[in-house]
Amino acid sequence: MALALGIDPGKIAHARSLARGVADDVQSFIEKRTTDSVERATVRLLGLDGVNDDGVVLPNVLSDHLKPRLASGIARPVLSGMVRHEWPIESLALAVSRNEIDLLAEGPLPDEKIRPLGEKLAADALGAIDTAATSRRDLIASLSDPPAPWLYVIVATGNIYEDIEQATQAAREGADVIAVIRSTGQSLLDYVPHGATTEGFGGTYATRENFRLMRAALDETGTAAGRYIRLVNYASGLCMPEIAALGAVERLDMMLNDCLYGILFRDINPDRTFIDQYASRLLSARAEIAINTGEDNYLTTADAVEKAHTVLASCLLNERFAERAGLPARLMEVGARVRDRSGDPRRAIA
């Protein structure tokens, strides 16, 4: 097989084999463990949203309360509390927040008591993800899918409502993909902010409401323009699985998601990063969300020649870890933005 770059296919196969060995070894570690954000994503998918009386997000209320039991999973004690008290999950979390009940002291109910509720809520969560994926396919079929290369435009005002103004104007002018840059430092927040936000720094906070607002605005603009407009955000940092879960149900189309970037550039615990990227990619695979990996950002902070081997290794490992999470090749994208030959930055393409 002749390749345009003249690279020996045998060397590519060998490199992929080495990456497979690394990823498979790490995968055996991943599958035996969980993280705070994986468990918070779980309760979000079980239907939990909102904040307590002090403005603390409720998924964090439950995960902090159940910290001693977190390694064995949050679902069993939460479902036990819902069945025992006959409360929806938000009422349960609020009661925990007000110190009205102690799920640790109550202990879990037998599996047969909680399984019907767990199966129902899991089916509801998967149904919401599948509905979003179906909606995307239907909209693309009824409108049109812009031909590649796609025009990729970034908005980053810090105010979701101003972002929407910029994004919809860009879409009317021909943008095919809108990327909402996150507020500076959000990758290091160990919670997902709640609600619509207007005070980000260098970007806009990734929240479920912000996802919903931007998705609705782009759908309206795309319908008027007769083409589907894609939406991008970041499933990275300390809340990678939670943001992936929110993006899955609110129909984002691409997520910046990398197995190494948080380790190399954000000093995040490697164990947590590898576990979180697996959970987030499982969700993206189900939701048919493409992932953009972080190699372009590597090259903004390091010499492209000196660090070329690092970037190449990252590409190979990202590919293998994505495969292990069931992400098909069509949903794996290298995170890179280039200008067209005119040099016009407005013609940036993904």
Image (tube, helix red, strand yellow):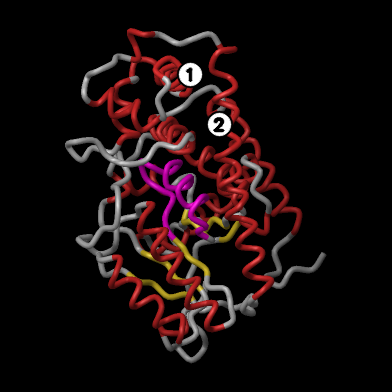
Residue in front for this viewpoint, 318 or 173: 173
Q: Quadrant where the N terminus lies? A: bottom right
Write down the quadrant of residue 86 in the picture: top left
Residue for badge 2: 26
Looking at the rendering, which quadrant does residue 173 occupy? bottom left
Label annotation for residue 176: none
Foreground pick, 292 / 99:
99
Secondary structure category for the residue under label 1: helix
Seen from this angle, which residue lies furthest bottom? 342
Task: Please check the rendered image and state whether residue 138 is part of the magenta-colored stretch, yes or no.
Answer: no
Who comes first in sequence, dot 2 or dot 1? 2
Q: Is residue 326 left or right of residue 244?
A: right
What percent of the width, then of the height, locates residue 259?
Answer: 49, 45
Kind of residue indicated by mark 1: Arg
Magenta stretch bounds: 233-252
Q: Residue at x 59, y 36 (%)?
A: 22
| Residue drawn 53% across the image and 73% down it | 229
- Residue 298 in the image, given as x and y percentages of width and height: 41, 58
